[in-house]
Amino acid sequence: MIQIIGAGAIGCLWLAKLQQSNFACHIVTRTKHQTTELQFTNLQAEKIRLPISHSHQLLHNTLIEQQSVILVCVKAPNVLSALLMQRPYISTQQPIILMHNGYGCADEILKHFPNNPIISATTANASLLNAPFNITQTGNGASYFGTFNCENKKLDLATLIKPFQAVMKDVHWCNDIAEKCWLKLIINAAINPLTAIHQIKNGALQASEFSLTIKAIIEESLAIAKAEQFNFELLSLQKSINAVIEATAPNYSSMNRDIFYRRETEIEFINGYLIKKAHQHNIEAPILTNLYQQIKALEYRSPTVVNNC
């Protein structure tokens, strides 16, 4: 059994793919929904209806099988609270997979779940949440999973991702998952705040007016990453970011949509995390800080709208 906490775009995408291949799944949502099916539009524009099992934590407040794998797909600011609400129903040694934008959540989860194998994951797959349990897949990409804390001697953690490998292409177990997460972190820092502030699609960042800012973001992030013992190269990072911008050109970033709908963003776990590390190493990060401040100002321009998934 694979259980998913969070019925947003990515949680529902994994649910759809797993259900299509007849893997047993259950999804835990924040609010109550009456539907018993997921509406899924794939990359070929085929519309598919899939039966699903789901519960609302305030009614059931339980994960239905204690020995199942837990895939957490809520936004970074909500990861800890989502898991703590389910804590009485999570057994020790039960694997917890964290899949979200940004960095820093796993450290907090480890404090509260010290005996659980914690797996960090990052994905370049993309999906659009049209309505509750109604999604459209908008992109394919690589997914990486790897252990955050120590290896569990009694459990081969790499085997846990076999269902994910069976339903999606380009899914890998990664022994250097921290480096993959940092790469995703820097890509997010370069794309998400700019697209949110200017309310543009990712592809608009290909315009020359953004090139100097993106380069400055990369340079600041590189200095911070180096202090954290990650050795990325400037040209390689530029190519990676440009490739993501091109591949996701028609898409809105998640931070763009959060600002559009006046929701809390993941800025604390993207730019905020990089800024915190910069301070620890006495590194100047004026561009990252400026973008962080702009996003925080936009977050609080009006009351937050709750994401009901």
Image (cartoon, helix red, strand yellow):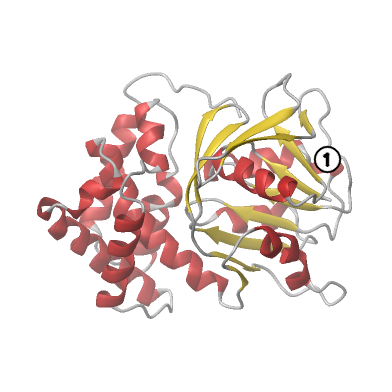
**Residue shown at the point (83%, 27%) measured from the top left:** 60
**288 with respect to 14 (left or right):** left
Badge 1: residue crowd in 10 Å (few <14, some 14–19, many ≥20): many
Above or below, 172 against 231 in this view is: above
Residue at which label 1 appears = 63
**Of residues 47 and 160, which is closer to you in this image?**
47
Of residues 140 and 191, the one nearer the viewer is 140
Rendered residue at 49%/60% (across/down)? 141
Going by the numbered disc 1, the residue's amino acid type is: Leu
Q: Is residue 131 visible?
A: yes
> Please, which residue is most extreme toward the left here?
209
Residue 254, picture quadrant:
top left
Which corner quadrant holds the C terminus?
A: top right
Q: Position of residue 38 (x, y in %)?
A: 67, 32
| In the image, residue 109 above or below residue 74 | below
Residue 58 location (% of width, % of height): 76, 24
Residue 92 quadrant: bottom right
